[in-house]
């Protein structure tokens, strides 16, 4: 049974595409720019299905549908008559801000193309989709918003209370020689730990292998680091959940991403997996990238 069905619409350049990307991050199944003639069929398939994948669905509708954009009204009326639950999100912004965004990106407005002014296109579009704005359950004006604030606003409106009480934590090991993961929220540098690479018998192994784990655990520093890091995260995570954050990426890095970071990521995973309201996973990004160099 579908839980939420959100129709996302608004002015071109106001942030509708960003809204759909954020909803996708929040676990929504998103479809953009579906022809109006197919919206009714799509809605019926989604709403009558039992696939967990479509539990939360967002459908983008905008002026790119052309003159048929007004036909969406018939679909909305039919859904209301059949008491099908849905909500409309309208992404808005001032004409001045939208014109500025188009000029900065040098994009063409869908209603004017290469001919006519952006200003005329924005005004025309506002008139054509005003009927959707009047029916919107939620209106978000992005005129003065930066993306982080926009994301927080979207999360506030479209993250259910049940989902707010959980957080997905991804623990990622990596090698600094291959770059810091761009998606990381928190990065821990473990290059200060004893390096198994310099022991011939351990060099070809990885942090997943018992001999490497035993070697690193033979020192006190890794144990203290893990204990303090786990304590810090166990303090932070409930506050992240309270703030509405539902995804947290924790990166552990060593030189090559093969020994120390792998073991530390695994150990941190074990400690955090004991917490309630968290879904923890671990991934070793660079484990197979770092070649074992043989020295004579």
Image (tube, rainbow, N blue to C red):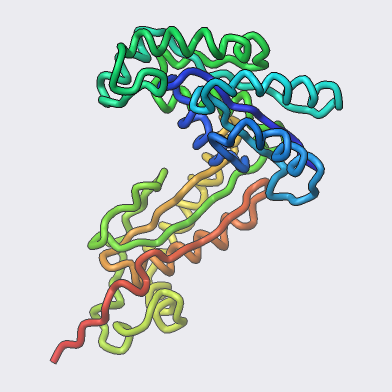
Name of the residue lying farthest toward the bottom: 296
Closer to the camera in the image, 241 or 80: 80
Residue at 34% from the left image edge and 47% from the top image edge: 182
The residue that appears at 64% across and 27% down in the rendered structure is 7
Instruction: Examine the rendered structure and indicate whether residue 264 appears above or below residue 201.
Output: above
Query: Does 293 sit left or right of 8 as displayed?
Result: left
Asked where in the image residue 149 lies, by quadrant, the reply is top left
The front one of 226 and 49 is: 49
Front one among 129 and 3: 129
Farthest residue, direction right: 82
Q: Position of residue 72 (x, y in %)?
A: 66, 23
Decide: is 35 above or below 195.
above
User: Residue 148: x, y in percent?
Assistant: 43, 27
In the rendering, at what x and y percent does residue 47 appear? 78, 39
Image quadrant for the N terminus?
A: top right
Whole-percent x and y of residue 14? 44, 19
Question: Is residue 240 in view?
Answer: no
Q: Quadrant of the C terminus?
A: bottom left
- Describe residue 11's horizontal placement relative to residue 167 as left or right: left
Horizontal arrangement in the rendering, residue 189 relative to residue 5 (left or right): left
Q: Image point 67% across, 16% down: which residue?
A: 137
């Amino acid at each position: 049974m579908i839980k939420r069905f959100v129709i996302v619409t608004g002015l071109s350049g106001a942030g509708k595409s960003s809204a759909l990307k954020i909803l996708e991050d929040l676990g929504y199944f998103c479809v953009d720019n579906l022809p109006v003639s197919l919206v009714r069929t799509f809605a019926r398939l989604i709403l009558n299905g039992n696939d967990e994948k479509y539990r939360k669905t967002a459908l983008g509708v905008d002026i790119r549908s052309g003159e048929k954009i007004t036909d969406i009204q018939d679909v909305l009326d039919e859904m209301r008559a059949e008491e099908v639950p849905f909500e409309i999100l309208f992404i808005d912004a001032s004409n001045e801000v939208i014109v500025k965004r188009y000029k900065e990106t040098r994009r063409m407005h869908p209603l004017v193309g290469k001919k006519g002014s952006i200003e005329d296109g924005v005004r025309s579009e506002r008139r054509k989709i005003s009927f959707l704005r009047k029916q919107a359950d939620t209106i978000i004006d992005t005129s003065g918003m930066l993306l982080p604030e926009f994301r927080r606003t979207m999360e506030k409106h479209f993250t259910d209370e049940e989902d707010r009480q959980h957080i997905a934590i991804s623990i990622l090991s990596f090698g600094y020689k291959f770059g810091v993961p761009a998606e990381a929220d928190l990065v821990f540098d473990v290059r200060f730990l004893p390096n198994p690479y310099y022991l011939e018998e351990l060099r070809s192994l990885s942090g997943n292998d018992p001999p490497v784990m035993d070697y690193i655990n033979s020192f006190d520093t890794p144990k203290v680091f893990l204990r303090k890091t786990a304590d810090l995260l166990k303090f932070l995570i409930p506050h992240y959940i309270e703030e509405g954050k539902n995804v947290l990426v924790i990166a552990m890095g060593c030189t090559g991403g093969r020994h120390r970071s792998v073991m530390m990521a695994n150990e941190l995973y074990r400690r955090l997996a004991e917490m309630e309201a968290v879904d923890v996973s671990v991934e070793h990004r660079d484990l197979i990238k770092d070649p074992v160099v043989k020295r004579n």
